Image: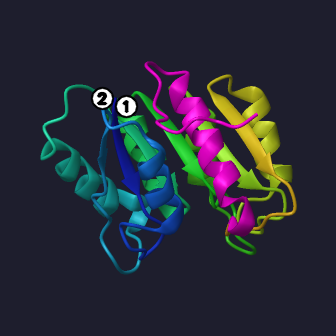
Amino acid sequence: MNVVLLPGFNGAARQPVLARLGAALSPGHRCEYPGLPRGRPSEGLTREVRFLEAAIAGLALDGPPVLVGRSFGGRVALRYALEQPVRALVLLGFPLRPPDRPRPDDEAALRRVEVPTLVVQGDADEKGPLALLEPIVRRNRQLTLVVLPKTGHRFGRHERTAVEAAVDFLSGLGPPVSRARRRV
């Protein structure tokens, strides 16, 4: 399984939650960090999606990738998935609608996604309120929501739980992806 990790807005390719997830993947899974263009987002995220398209084409993958996006990276991953084949999506802290900034295109994209998609969201995430996200998840069977209690947009002490949820989800897509043993 090829996993492509996308950072948040103007973020470094190795944001801590993505680095932790990459480390949790088994050695047999390719993990790439193409980053994203910096600066103000383009209209409809067109520039960012084209950048990702070129980056993925340059990776010479052996099949459709799994895209893991942190915040803004999730927005780009979701838009890419509406245009290009992907195996699955993992959206970590999806900024569906920040305060006073409706994003109807992102809401529509979530409604239309047709591949298995995990959304890991804090219950106090002001950029992705559960009151808006939960009805979309209920209507689209491809979406799975994991809610982190007492957590905002930055996962903080719940980062490990977010990574575990992503690894569990990815494990359900094919061969095991975790190289660490779980303590029960």
Q: Is residue 153 visible?
A: no
- The amino acid pointed to by label 1 is Val
Asked if residue 113 is positioned above or below residue 119 in the image, the reply reads above
Mark 1, Cα crowd under 10 Å, few <14 / some 14-19 / many 20+, is many
Asked if residue 58 is positioned above or below residue 12 in the image, the reply reads above
Which quadrant does the N terminus fall into? Answer: top left
Residue 156: x and y in percent read: 70, 69
Residue 157 covered by magenta stretch: yes
- The amino acid pointed to by label 2 is Pro
Q: Which residue is mark 2?
A: 64
Which residue is located at x 43 percent, y 59 percent? Answer: 44
Q: What is the magenta range?
A: 155-184
Q: Which residue is mark 1?
A: 86
Q: Check contact, mark 1 vs mark 2: CB within 8 A.
A: yes
Calculate the distance from the C-alpha at mark 1 to the C-alpha at mark 2. Answer: 5 Å
Residue 90 covered by magenta stretch: no
